[in-house]
C-alpha cells in the first residue's frame, strides 16, 4: 500500500503530470506572443531565434536548454557575470525580453521533453559548477530543474552560490503541490515587481 501511495504521490507522479498539462496549456495560450517575439528577433538581428545552451539537469546530466536569443551573434562566449558592459551586446528586443523574463518561454518545450519541470532548481551552466556540487550534496541534483524555483523567488541573482543551493536543497526535501503554487505566485509577483533580478 505504501509503495502504491509513493508511486502516485505528487513528487513521483502528479508533479510530472501537472507539468505536461501546464506546459501544453501555456504554449497554446502564449503561441501568438511567442511568434511575435520570434519575428522581432529575426528582423532586428542576424542569427538564430532560439539560443541553445548546455545545462546540468536531473542527476547532473547535461541537456540543451532553450531561450529566445537576446544577444548579438558577435557576443563573446563567456558567463554573464564576466561581462563589463553586457548591454552593448543585447539585441534591440533583447533588453526587454530579459527584463520581463520572456526569453525563458521556450523552456516550456524543455518541460514537454522531460528535461525540466515548471518549478524546480534552475539548471546551471558549466560556469556554475560550485552550485552543481552543492546540489549534489543536498539532494537538489536528484530532481528536474525548473523554469522557476525557490531560489528565484527568494533573491535570484543577488544570492550567493551557497544560498542558491541551500534554497534548492530545502525545496527538494519538501516538494508539494502547495509549495509549487506558492512559488508560482511569487514568480508572477517577482516578474511584475522586478525584485531580485539582475538586469545587466
Image (tube, rainbow, N blue to C red):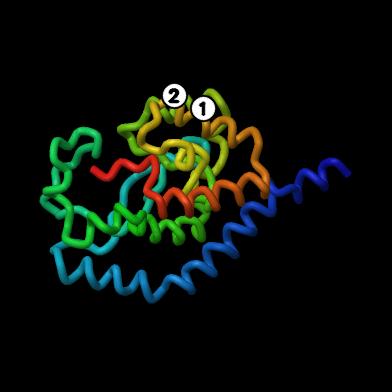
Vertical comparison of 3 with 140: above or below = below
Residue furthest front as drawn: 193
39 relative position to 180: left or right? left
Please report the residue visible at 49 percent of the width from the left and 58 percent of the height from the top: 113
Percent coordinates x, y for residue 148 in the rendering = 48, 48
Q: Are marks 2 and 1 in contact (CB under 8 Å)?
A: yes
Residue at the spot of label 1? 166
Q: Secondary structure at mark 1?
A: helix
Q: Specify few, some or many for label 1: CA neighbours under 10 Å numbering under 14, 14-19, or 20 or more.
A: some
Residue at the spot of label 2? 162
199 relative position to 31: left or right? left
Q: Specify few, some or many for label 2: CA neighbours under 10 Å numbering under 14, 14-19, or 20 or more.
A: few
Q: Quarter holding the C terminus?
A: top left
Please report the residue visible at 39 percent of the width from the left and 26 percent of the height from the top: 160
Residue furthest bottom as drawn: 32
Q: In whole angstroms, how far apart are the C-alphas of marks 2 and 1?
A: 6 Å
Amino acid at each position: 500500500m505504501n509503495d502504491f501511495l509513493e508511486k502516485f504521490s505528487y513528487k513521483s507522479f502528479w508533479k510530472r503530470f501537472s507539468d505536461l498539462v501546464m506546459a501544453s496549456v501555456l504554449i497554446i495560450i502564449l503561441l501568438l506572443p511567442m511568434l511575435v517575439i520570434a519575428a522581432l528577433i529575426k528582423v532586428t538581428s542576424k542569427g538564430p531565434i532560439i539560443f541553445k545552451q548546455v545545462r546540468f539537469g536531473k542527476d547532473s546530466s547535461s541537456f540543451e536548454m532553450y531561450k529566445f536569443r537576446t544577444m548579438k551573434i558577435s557576443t563573446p562566449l563567456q558567463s554573464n557575470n564576466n561581462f563589463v558592459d553586457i548591454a552593448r551586446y543585447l539585441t534591440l528586443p533583447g533588453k526587454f525580453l530579459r527584463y520581463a523574463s520572456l526569453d525563458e518561454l521556450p523552456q516550456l518545450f524543455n518541460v514537454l521533453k522531460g528535461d525540466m519541470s515548471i518549478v524546480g532548481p534552475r539548471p546551471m551552466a558549466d560556469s556554475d559548477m560550485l552550485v552543481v556540487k552543492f546540489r549534489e550534496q543536498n539532494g537538489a541534483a536528484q530532481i528536474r530543474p525548473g523554469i522557476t524555483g525557490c531560489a528565484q523567488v527568494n533573491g535570484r541573482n543577488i544570492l550567493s552560490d551557497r544560498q542558491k543551493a541551500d534554497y534548492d536543497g530545502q525545496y527538494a526535501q519538501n516538494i508539494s503541490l502547495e509549495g509549487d503554487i506558492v512559488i508560482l505566485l511569487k514568480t508572477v509577483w517577482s516578474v511584475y515587481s522586478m525584485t531580485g533580478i539582475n538586469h545587466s
